[in-house]
Structure formats: C-alpha cells, structure tokens
Amino acid sequence: MTTAVSILPEQQLAALNAAYRQAVSRRRLRLLLGAGVFAAALALAAIGAEVNLRTLFTYFGNFVSYFDRILTLDSSQRVWTDVGEWFWGWRKWLKMLGETLLISYVGTLIGATFAFALNFFAAENTSPAPWLRFTVRRLLEFARTVPGIVFALVFVIAFGLGPMAGVLAIAIHSTGALGKLFSEIVENADMKPVEGIRSTGASWLSCMRFAIVPQVTAGYASYALLRFEINVREASVMGFVGAGGIGQELVVAIRKFYYSDVSAILLTIIVTVFIIDITTGWLRGRLFGKEART
C-alpha cells in the first residue's frame, strides 16, 4: 500500500517563508516601538519628577555614610560588638512597640467592623438602591484615598498627641480599604441562596445574614488579618506626627542624631513586622487554605 505525500511547490514554500519573516519583522517592530514609547514616557516622568542622576550619584555617599553612622556606637565601635549598649532602652522601646501593636489591633478591629456594616450597601448585587450604593462607594473611596498619616495629623491637631489619633486614623483608612475588598467578595458570592431565602418572604437583612455571610466569612477574616499586617507598619510611621507608638521615639532619635538608637529601633520594628507577617500568613493558610497566604 503506497501513501500519497503532498509536497508543496517551491513557490508556495517561498511565499510561506516570506510571510513568516514579515510577521516576525512586524512583531519586532511593535516591540521596539513599545520599548521606545516606554523609555520616552519614563524620561518625561523623570524630568517632571525632577529626578537628577547627577545629584543621585553625587550625594549617594551621604546615604551610605548615614548607615555607617547608625551602625556605630558613641565609642566608635560597631553596634554588634556591645549589644547591651546598643539596646540600652529596650524596655522603653518594647513598651512603645506594644502600644503600636495595640493601636494597629484596635484600629483594624474598628475598621473591619465598619467595613462589614457598609460593604453590603456598596456591592452591586446586594445594595438595596443605586443611590445608596453610589454614596457608600464614594464614602469608602474617600476613607482609603486620604493617606493614613494625614488623618493622624488631623486627629493629633484635634485631640492632641497620643495613641487615640493613631487608632482613629487606622480605623478610617481600614474601613475604606476593607470595605472595598469585602464588597468585591460579596459581588462574587452565589446569589441562588439569596433568591431561595427571598422567596420565603424574608427581609433584606435576613438574606444577608443567612445567604451571604456564611459564604464570605472566611474571605473577610483573611483580608482583616492581611490588613492588620499593613496597619502595624502604618502605625509605626504615624508616630512621626505624634500619634503614639514606637514611631514617636524613632523620630526623636532621628532629630537628635542618636545614631545607634535609630538602628536599634529600626531593627526592633523590622523584626516585629517579620514575625507578624509570618504568623498571620501561617494562620491564614491554616484557617482558609493555601490561596489565602498570597
């Protein structure tokens, strides 16, 4: 039995090769044009932002020398040669670090509570009225758009120095951020249980309670834990404007040129954030599955 093998004529093969080369050339041209546009946009943005490479390289040594100073004790020795002298104020710093953690915890809890109460009105599939959805969404946008440190500064002016300003700032910013995340979870929820409960004559509140909340609780908790990680870092910075916590001690050390204290406080904050990130990531993974870790 013979098998017929069709062989394209040489003209057809040449035409296919030419078409392939032309397609490759067009693709390369598009890539080059895209890279050129990106480079031009980057250059224009750098000019607008006053990024000066000459200044960067001229004063880069000052940046390096500062780290050299914060890693040197008053005795001109490296900080790790005398840990007791380096962390001389560890009791005070741990107390203020505990204050930072409490600010983050309370602010996150308040923000999560308000976000839980508002997100059903912001979600497209559960909001009772379009005007209400529009209003709540704009409110949440305002709460998360204004930087937390700006809120902290306003509350410091209004209520004075201390942790209260930090708690209020984190609570408002967390409400806006978690409200958006929570509403997106609700918009992806299965609406069939809602229709089933609604067919029995149940109220809107009952539909949310028995049909939506059981589906989204795990996602809410996962995002709330993730937000707590972020808020620990934010609370550390809010101390710069007098909103309590260890950031307040850090800015004092920076302003008074207590170089070794700066490195000790920074290391304390970094290690604490690492521990919290690892712990909450492990907890999310244990409670809600591997996808929640990301």
Image (tube, rainbow, N blue to C red):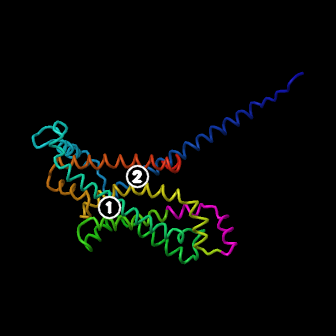
On the image, the x and y values in percent for residue 219 come to 52, 57
Residue 149, quarter of picture: bottom left
Q: Which residue is mark 1?
A: 103
Q: In the picture, which quadrant includes the N terminus?
A: top right
Taking depth in this image into account, of 211 and 244 the one nearest to the observer is: 211
Q: Nearer the viewer, mark 1 or mark 2?
A: 1
Taking depth in this image into account, of 18 and 235 the one nearest to the observer is: 235
On the image, the x and y values in percent for residue 251 come to 21, 57
Taking depth in this image into account, of 157 and 290 the one nearest to the observer is: 290
* Image position of 111 (left or right of 50): right
Q: Residue at x 85, y 25 (%)?
A: 3
Which amino acid, by three-letter code, is at mark 2?
Leu
Secondary structure under badge 2?
Answer: helix
Secondary structure under badge 1?
Answer: helix
- Kindly give the residue lying farthest to the top in the view shown: 1
Q: Which residues are magenta?
A: 181-201
Q: Residue at x 40, y 47 (%)?
A: 279
- Kindly give the residue lying farthest to the right in the view shown: 1
| Alpha carbon separation for disc pair 1 and 2 | 39 Å
On the image, the x and y values in percent for residue 48 come to 34, 58
Which amino acid, by three-letter code, is at mark 1?
Ile
On the image, the x and y values in percent for residue 189 come to 60, 61
Q: Which residue is mark 2?
A: 42
Q: Relative to 267, does residue 123 appear above or below in the rendering?
A: below
Total labels drawn: 2
Residue 294 visible somewhere in the drawing: no
